[in-house]
């Protein structure tokens, strides 16, 4: 499969539905020069998403593609593709985009579509991961970055970070610690892609020319809270 050339300033589009904390981490790392990515646009399916406010504050185009304006998912995804492609992105980043994307959409961006999920995939796909981890009595939790394919939260894994589940953890406390790791992990992996180190070959992740046999496990860095 052909790969993009390493680019000093890879144009990217970020899709976000809510607060946009991972978006902010990407914007911050881009601004300080540690991430060779230009966020060309942030697109949301919610007009009041805070992610749009974050985009405007950074001088990035803030756009919406609202599901209520389309009769079905197929037409919505077609419109979303048109909106994204106006920016000619080398990478599309899902940062809390809370929609199930059609196979057509995923195939269109195959190999240049990344997602971060708040669990140690393949465990706890879907929603409410922190609550489910606590209910399941897990000792470890974390986050995963993967290429997006047609399987929900099931694309080839690239990298993960673990956190220890504490005996006194609440859902909010656990979420905050996992998000702290997300904000480190996602820009790092996006940087691998932007520098031409990372690619998807069929269903296999290639990093620095070698097929990953397991996701890269990054050690957690936690503040003493």
Image (cartoon, grey):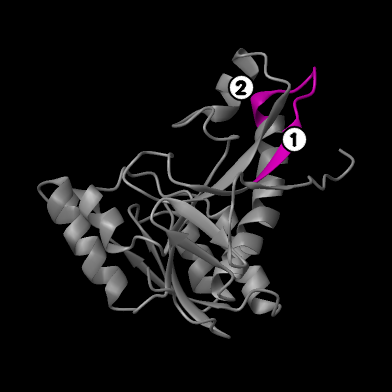
> Which of the 4 quarters of the picture holds residue 211?
bottom right
Q: What is the spatial separation of the Cα atoms under label 2 and label 1, in whole angstroms? A: 12 Å
Q: Which quarter of the figure is the C terminus placed in? A: top right
> Which of the 4 quarters of the picture holds residue 121?
top right
Q: Could you tell me residue 92's position as x and y percent?
A: 41, 65
| Left or right of residue 107: residue 56 | right
Judging by the rendered image, the residue that carries numbered circle 2 is: 133
Q: Residue at image x 42%, y 75%? A: 90
Q: Residue at image x 18%, y 54%? A: 76
Residue 159, above or below 137: below
Q: Could you tell me residue 128's position as x and y percent?
A: 51, 28
Judging by the rendered image, the residue that carries numbered circle 1 is: 163
Residue 9, above or below 156: below
Crowding near the residue tagged with mark 1, few <14, some 14–19, many ≥20 C-alpha atoms within 10 Å: many
Q: Residue at image x 72%, y 31%? A: 173
Q: Nearer the viewer, residue 32 or 54?
A: 32
Residue 111, above or below 153: below
User: Which numbered disc flags the more N-terminal residue, 2 or 1?
Assistant: 2
Q: How many marks?
A: 2
Give the extent of the magenta segment: 160-172
Q: Residue at image x 62%, y 67%? A: 208
Residue farthest right in this picture = 224
Residue 123, above or below 113: above
Secondary element at image label 1: strand
Q: Based on the picture, tell me whether residue 3 belongs to the magenta stretch.
A: no
């Amino acid at each position: 499969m052909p790969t993009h050339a390493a680019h000093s300033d890879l144009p990217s589009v970020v899709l976000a539905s809510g607060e946009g904390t991972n978006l902010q981490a990407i914007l911050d790392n881009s601004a300080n020069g540690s991430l060779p990515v230009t966020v060309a646009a942030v697109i949301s399916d919610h007009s009041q998403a805070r992610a749009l406010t974050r985009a405007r504050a950074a001088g990035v185009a803030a756009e919406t593609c609202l599901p209520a304006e389309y009769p079905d998912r197929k037409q919505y995804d077609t419109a979303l593709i048109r909106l994204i492609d106006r920016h000619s992105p080398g990478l599309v980043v899902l940062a809390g985009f809370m929609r199930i994307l059609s196979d057509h959409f995923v195939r269109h961006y195959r190999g240049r579509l990344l997602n971060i999920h708040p669990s140690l995939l393949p465990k706890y796909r879907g929603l409410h991961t922190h609550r489910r981890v606590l209910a399941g009595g897990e000792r470890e939790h974390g986050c995963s970055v993967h290429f997006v394919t047609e399987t929900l939260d099931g694309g080839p894994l690239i990298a993960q970070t673990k956190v220890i589940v504490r005996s006194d953890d609440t859902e909010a406390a656990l979420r905050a610690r996992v998000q702290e790791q997300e904000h480190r992990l996602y820009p790092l992996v996006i940087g691998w892609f932007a520098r031409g180190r990372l690619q998807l070959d069929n269903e296999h992740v290639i990093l620095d020319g070698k097929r990953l046999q397991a996701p890269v496990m990054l050690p957690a860095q936690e503040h003493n809270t």
